[in-house]
Amino acid sequence: MTRGGMPKYLQLKHEILSWLHRGERKPHELLPSENELAARFGMSRQTVRQTLAELEQEGYLYRQRGKGTFVAPPHFAKAGGAAGTAVGMVTTYISDYIFPHIVRGAEAVLRARGMGLYLSSTDNDKDRERESLRMMLDRGVGGLIIEPTKSAEGNPNLDQYLAFRYRGVPFVMINARYPELDCPCLVVDDEAGAYAATEHVIRLGHRRIAGFFKTDDLQGTRRMKGYLRAMKRYGVPILPDGVVTYASHNKWTYPVGKAGQLLRREERPTAIVCYNDELAVALLRAVREAGLAVPDDLSIVGFDDSTLAQAAEVKLTTLTHPKTEMGERAAEMLLRLMADPTYEAEDVIYTPELVVRESTRAVGVGARG
Amino acid sequence: MTRGGMPKYLQLKHEILSWLHRGERKPHELLPSENELAARFGMSRQTVRQTLAELEQEGYLYRQRGKGTFVAPPHFAKAGGAAGTAVGMVTTYISDYIFPHIVRGAEAVLRARGMGLYLSSTDNDKDRERESLRMMLDRGVGGLIIEPTKSAEGNPNLDQYLAFRYRGVPFVMINARYPELDCPCLVVDDEAGAYAATEHVIRLGHRRIAGFFKTDDLQGTRRMKGYLRAMKRYGVPILPDGVVTYASHNKWTYPVGKAGQLLRREERPTAIVCYNDELAVALLRAVREAGLAVPDDLSIVGFDDSTLAQAAEVKLTTLTHPKTEMGERAAEMLLRLMADPTYEAEDVIYTPELVVRESTRAVGVGARG
DNA sequence: TTCGTGCAGTTGTATGTACAAGTATGGCGA
DNA sequence: TCGCCATACTTGTACATACAACTGCACGAA
């Protein structure tokens, strides 16, 4: 096949482009090495490099030193605006607790692939979530990582999500999933985690075990479920008012007050299973103010193994949360979905592990001091 | 001008970009020929061509066979699509310490104004900073909030910043400023803060006062300066090895080890002024392992009033950092600069306030218990 | 004057070599 | 079994050379 007058490197360029356009090479597939192409097409490696450089510049290929040359996913090829080169991330909080770690993991992966990251937070407010989604749509992000807002309370922004779907913009969810939306998600097995936490204190001999759960998102309800299941499984009776549920808006006041009441009762609990470390740390204070000590008088189990768990006055027994890794895998999954819309992503479920520190102890064992 | 390790063709690229950024070459002006550049910079024509190819690709130059290579007018330099609707933010860390709060403040203001936020982190690595800036440039952000990376160690990415200026994209800096860049910045008065911290322990009667400072960024050097000034002002002698400097890469090991040595000496310090809360918390552990107690045997002052300060086993005496407010004002300032390029923004300098908690005590007063 | 030719100078195409730097792998030894 | 190292293979950088294609200009011929 000769092409009149056309420079060799352009001939090769068209040849390679025809591979892509005919779908003979799938995204992220390895192309022949420069030397092999040179040999096969009877040209020097430098000429091949010129071809590949142009194709890379135009977004059709990407190259990695030491590994090879690969087919770029289609959206790289458009290369026009920011359309296919950035993804959005919508989380409940940006600055608090474990969320910065999740963001960080996603950001690292995206940066390594030259993708931009649009960030927005909802402060766990559904109107803000709506605003954020709208903004992402306007910006034309190529994909979306979302942490649902108040996932236990329905999804008034369903129409926004469907708008993304209509445009073919894939999204993945982290920490929870709106049940009415069918999309891949990454979650920790909250129920198993809370079960393990409860089992832990039961095995330490505790019987009066309270549970505090934030129930406006699904994580909280699942964790409560795990707690209840363990209590039932081991035949431990639930205390009167021993299960306290609260919501985001009163998380700094209500559970602390409730704990104060519980701890001043005659039949006070000897252990508390907490929704997360944030609450556990808040309760530490309530416990001290009630004149009790952790873990001597009361064992406390947190959840998420946040930095708080180790920085707290009493280092918390808690359950791990993948945090950074979850962000990384969410980003990787999303990139793959963006590259290949037919890819059937499977949910990733992390099983949290119990980390025993200083906030739990067997009943009746260590008196104070 | 040598640039360590950098490939020759990139050196030439920066050289030529600096011509453009400094306005030495006007649009449509003829550049020296490839052969002349090769001769002048002592490289082969092929290498020069590689440089020019990249610069042409990026829109800085255009070439005409038989005529020569010319400076492209600025509007050729690809103006982004998101110019008026998004800003970029480049911080050292995303997930740790006070940075999430700064990001949050900026994000809140930007979201209220319907602006998107591109986020990128550098992990305090200058190469990553370069990548991040490059990405922001590619995305065509309309403005930039930057926290300089290792600000005490010079600015190898100056050309990137000048590229933003060349395109008329305003930027503001937070926490520090590269001295060679004239731009508005928001900082805390680190020197005054460290002075106040040192003065505080001096007034509590301490005389053997060590100082630990991270000196690869300007904040650390300024804080050290404040410490030294207070010591001199009050005529307190510096202990031998009493001033410990460290860097980001060894922040988790070196200062802790040094503290262990210091505390085991005969004439051990009775107070330590720390670069920040993160270090103070790390030292708390070292102190305990040395068999000493805070504040009974040793007073410690942190800096930044982070969440750590209150969550730590001993609540830290520390100095405030505006965090969220700094992020908000940085965003507001940037938005104003974007709206009105003639606006002369003034630096914002926050004076940190001393917060006395439990980690400092007058010498010889409170024995243990 | 006008046209054309040749020439010097420019970028474009093409090939050759060599070594640097990064990745993956298999084998070897502790 | 684990970790280390040598090795083979990849792309990245740099040099040298040659010729093609094109521009602009000077010079000479019609």
Image: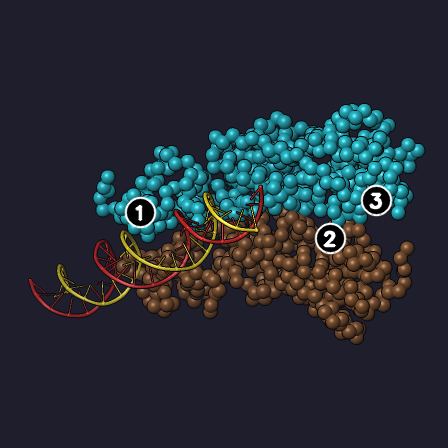
Chain colours: A cyan, B brown, C yellow, D red
- Residue shown at 33%/57% (left/top)? B63
**Image-quadrant location for residue A222:** top right
Query: To which chain does the residue with label 1 belong?
Result: A
Q: Is label 3 in a helix, a strand or a loop? A: helix
Q: Are marks 1 and 3 on the same chain?
A: yes
Q: Which residue is mark 2?
A: B306
- Residue shown at 85%/39% (left/top)? A298
- Residue shown at 35%/37% (left/top)? A19
Q: Is label 2 in a helix, a strand or a loop? A: loop
Q: CA distance from mark 1 to mark 3?
A: 71 Å
**Image-quadrant location for residue A255:** top right
Q: Which residue is mark 3?
A: A285
Type of amino acid under label 3? Arg
Q: Is residue B52 visible?
A: no
Q: Is residue A242 left or right of residue A31?
A: right
Q: Which residue is mark 1?
A: A38
Type of amino acid under label 1? Ala
In front: label 2 or label 3: 3
x, y (%) of residue A140?
52, 40
1 and 2 marks in contact (CB < 8 Å) = no
Q: Is residue D26 left or right of residue A139?
A: left
**Image-quadrant location for residue A106:** top right
Vertical side of A302 occupied by B23: above or below = below
Residue closer to the observer: B298 or A340: B298
- Residue shown at 65%/64% (left/top)? B215
x, y (%) of residue B129?
55, 55
